[in-house]
Image (tube, helix red, strand yellow):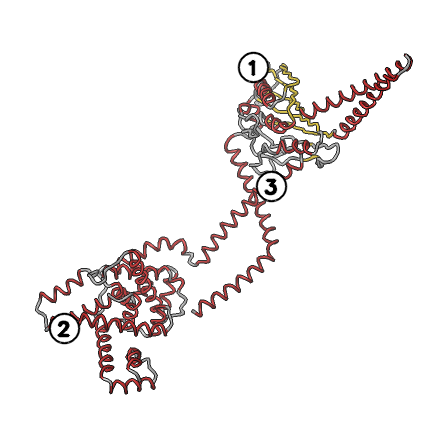
Amino acid sequence: MSDLEKLLVKKSQSGDIESFELLISSYDKRAYNIAYRIMGNEEDAKDMAQEALFRIFRSIKDFKGQSAFSTWSYRIVTNVCLDELRRRKNEKYVPIESTIQTDSGEAYIELCSDKETPESVFERTEQRELIKSAIDGLSEEYRSVIVLRDIQGFSYEEISTILDCSMGTVKSRINRARTMLKGRLKSSMELSCENRV
Amino acid sequence: MKCETIRNMISSYIDKDLNDIEKSELEKHIAECKECREEYENLLDIIAACGNLEEVELPQNFRTELHQRLVGEKKNFFSGILGKKSMKVAAGLVAAVLIAVIGIGSSDLFGKNAKMAQESAVAPGYGEATEPAAPDVAYDMGENKAKGMAKAEMPQVASINGVSRDSVTVQFNESIETTSKEGASNYAVNDSQAPSQAAESLRSGRMVIRTGNISVNVADVEKAATDIRQLTESSGGYVENSQIENISVPRVQDVNGSFPDKEATEKYANLTIRVPEAKFGNVFNNIKGMGKLTNENMSGSDITAEYRDTAARVDNLKIQEQSLKELMTKAKNVDEILRIESELNRVRTDIDIYSGNLKRWDNLVQLSTITIYMRELKPEELNSVDVPGMWGKAYKGFIKAVNNVVAGLEKTVIVLVTAIPYLVIAGVLAAIGFAIAKKIKLKK
């Protein structure tokens, strides 16, 4: 943690909102992205990210500096998202396959099908869409590690702090998640390949 | 190496998490094994694709919305803004301490008073006529709450002896001039304290004759007398003696320094009532509350010993009587008959006398005696003597509360000092506990 950051943290701990906003300005975009990738849509991502940042502000007094502020924050973000997912799972069956995605998801596809786009762009976009759905279809356990490792690029160590589990667990989870993802993609990619042909 | 093992390692290989040996093993295998190589490349693609996902921008009003929320929270934050948790804890502690202090202050006195009441006869609550319209002070018959009873005062006890001794005399003397000392305001006498005395004497088989004297100033003597009569009768007693006098008073400069227009008459009343012992305290207090108390007095005398002696004597005499009667039947001549006759008479007379005593005592014990002396005072006079009005009472109340707090503080200090050894031990244990808890947390 840089000195500036330390100072901002301290000021935030005594309730200074401005300092806090400055502090999180380095992290809020990434936090939002984590939320987006885990939740699967922008609406939820916004809610979860804001909630997480709010909680960070509220509990910043408890931040003891044992980990990096960023890691500590992302942990809260991840937890907020996962908790919500679990809560929803308990409440009702959410068909993930179908579109929980909002307009952005639909629009994407429509955009692509309506316009005449360069194939590569189209492919890339379609590919992204495929991957996104495949990721969205994973259980939250696997989804979180894929998001953190392969999308966000956190190290194993950071991930173990964020998810609060051992390195061994992280490794095996990543392994299985990737395998799972591969399996899902394979089936949906085969479909898209057929279409292309 | 087997394909399966290799496949499990691919993920770690991509993340550069394999050691040199494993790494070379894998690279070697992949160079040769097509399936595993495919597997590796597929995984690589997927991961690359994941990495290619675009980073999404923050929505337009994300930060402003968050700002709103933070500001809203800050308002709640303020309560903890004194910043640390410890402040909250401290505030809580202070509040708790204050409550404890006040609680100890008032309740302790209350406890003490209750105790005193039990040791002594009946603990009276001293009434003052605080309202000018004192005589209309409502008192409940058979209950102890006289509204005229303001704050109670500590009785000046002349002497207390345990009831269990012979010839107990308990006396309370108090004249109203003493300034109100510290006393719990909810020191009102309960019903329970009055009969407890009587119950005790009955239980232990003591015979105690209770007498009381009350002097009160009232605004309307006639009415008070009627009230007393009613009170007595409803308690199951009777009025033994009642006398009301009107005395003309020569004209005299009154309080304001002017001569009254007409001749004043002063009214006095003397009543003697008998009430059942169980109701004694009750009635006593009620009467006190009828006006402004100027004097009161209570005493009890234990006549158990004499009573028993007398009773025993009567029994003996009766036995004597019996044997005399038998003797009579055996009498042979007139001379003997006459002598036995006279002896018998003597015995019977004694029996009568002693039985009479016993009966009298029974009466006295069962019905306690209260003598009441009342004087009529015009409301203005009552007014000028008392401390009237709301502000006076408020002031008194305030003083009392302050005293309460002080007393409470004293007691708290005592309690705290007493508890220091315990606190020290507890503190040490808590500190150890915290240290251990922290260590556990750190390990995590």
Q: Residue at x 53, y 48 (%)?
A: B100
Direction from residue B152 to residue B63 in the image, left or right: left
Which chain is home to disc 2?
Answer: A
Percent across and percent down for residue B338 are 88, 13
Q: Choose the circle earlier in sequence order: 1 or 3.
A: 3
- What amino acid is found at the position of numbered circle 2 in the picture? Cys
Q: Which residue is mark 1?
A: B261
Element on which disc 1 rests? loop
Q: Residues within 10 Å of mark 3 (few under 14, many from 20)?
A: some
Mark pair 1, 3: CA separation: 53 Å
Q: Quadrant of residue B129?
A: top right
- What amino acid is found at the position of numbered circle 3 in the picture? Gly
Closer to the camera in the image, A184 or B118: A184
Q: Which mark is residue A193?
A: 2
Which chain is home to disc 3?
Answer: B
Q: Which residue is mark 3?
A: B111
Percent across and percent down for residue B441 are 44, 67
Element on which disc 2 rests? helix
Image: B69 above or below B10:
above
| Quadrant holding the C terminus of chain B | bottom left
Image: B152 above or below A62:
above
Question: Can residue B81 be seen here?
Answer: yes
Percent across and percent down for residue A105 are 18, 63
Direction from residue B93 to residue A58 in the image, left or right: left
Q: Residues within 10 Å of mark 2 (few under 14, many from 20)?
A: few
Q: Are marks 2 and 1 on the same chain?
A: no
